[in-house]
Amino acid sequence: MGGHVGALSVSSSCIHFPHPRLPRLSRNRRPFAVAAMSDDPISEWILTEGNATKITRISPIGGGCINVARRYDTDGGSFFIKTNRSIGPAMFEAEALGLNAMYDTRTIRVPKPFKVGPLPTGGSYIIMEFIEFGGRGGNQSVLGRKLAEMHKAGKSEKGFGFDVDNTIGSTPQINIWSSDWVQFYAEHRLGYQLKLALEQYGDRTIYERGQRLIKSMEPLFENVIIEPCLLHGDLWSGNISSAKNGEPVILDPACYYGHNEAEFGMSWCAGFGGSFYNAYFEVMPKQAGFEKRRDLYMLYHYLNHYNLFGSGYRSSAMSIIDDYLRTLSA
């Protein structure tokens, strides 16, 4: 099925999200340039910095429900635009930072972001490279190899985290830097989602059992070398496509630097096959205990789905927690 970058502008699920909670920029940092206000900042940028002299067509692109997506065709090429009438530039700033980080590895193809800014009537926009899609998924072995190359190239000297907080779907994702991966994952991934479940549903059972797992999960990481790798962070089938030449394309990220194995947390909704993993592990060798940790990384996303969509995902999350508590005798 053909498509365009951003046609699926919603992250972290096999189904659509409700309107998002507003993400916040971490620690008051704004490292991505935000455009100045004008009556039509999108057209203004395209006709100046975008090196076009005429916009020939503006076409809607369906698929998302958080943002409105459009293709702008010009005499200088095409651009992909996402707008959101209710949220300021912070969400798109975070997306642009993630896309730029992945783009700068020169490994797997991602749309290049060009500009983020506020809309004069409220809300915000992001302008990025338009990529004509040739089909969903593409070659699994090429995808696996390219993703591993990104993980290998994208390193951070700051540790685990990211320069800004972002969103996983519409849930805030906290990315405060940490030198300890297990602590980071416990506090800012599992712990954050468990707290949301307690606050939103009063679900003390899943909260308390989840906290028991967090306190006892250290043995799962014994004798494992964990280096901060740049992660897409929300890699499911809706965020994976291919260009017309068959080259894999990944989009709509929730980037941060983390354990490379955490990238497969959405594998239950990604369709990764044996050729994908074989190609990936040729570049990034599988470490002992990979299978034992796989469900731990899925748990973050099951909890997020529970918090976003309700009880339909609770049993999957609870089953993972209970299995680990039995295995770890916690």
Image (cartoon, helix red, strand yellow):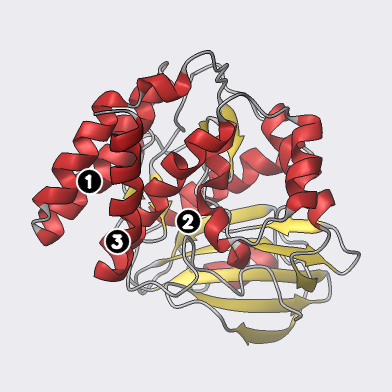
Disc 2 vs disc 1: which is toward the camera? 1
Q: Label 1: which residue?
A: 194
Residue drawn at (64%, 43%) of the image: 100
Towards the viewer: 176 or 44: 176
Q: Give the vertical position of 136 relative to 168 (above or below).
A: below
Q: Can you give x and y, in whole percent of width and height, for residue 71 in the image?
A: 67, 78
Instruction: Give the amino acid at mark 1.
Output: Leu
Instruction: Give the amino acid at mark 3.
Output: Ser
Towards the viewer: 128 or 11: 11
Disc 3 vs disc 2: which is toward the camera? 3
Q: Can you give x and y, in whole percent of width and height, for residue 14 in the image?
A: 50, 70
Residue drawn at (72%, 77%) of the image: 3
User: In the figure, is residue 187 to the left or right of 113?
Assistant: left
Q: Give me the disc on residue 315.
A: 3
Q: Label 2: which residue?
A: 92
Q: Are marks 1 and 3 in contact (CB under 8 Å)?
A: no
Residue 286, image quadrant: top right
Label 1 – label 3 distance at C-alpha = 14 Å
Towards the viewer: 158 or 53: 158
Pick whichever of labels 1 and 3 is earlier in the sequence: 1
| Quadrant of the snapshot with the C terminus | top left
Q: Give the vertical position of 206 relative to 19 (above or below).
A: above
| Label 1 element class | helix
Residue 137, image quadrant: bottom right
| Label 2 element class | helix
| Label 3 element class | helix
Towards the viewer: 289 or 139: 289
Residue drawn at (62%, 64%) of the image: 237
Q: Can you give x and y, in whole percent of width and height, for residue 193 in the image?
A: 27, 47
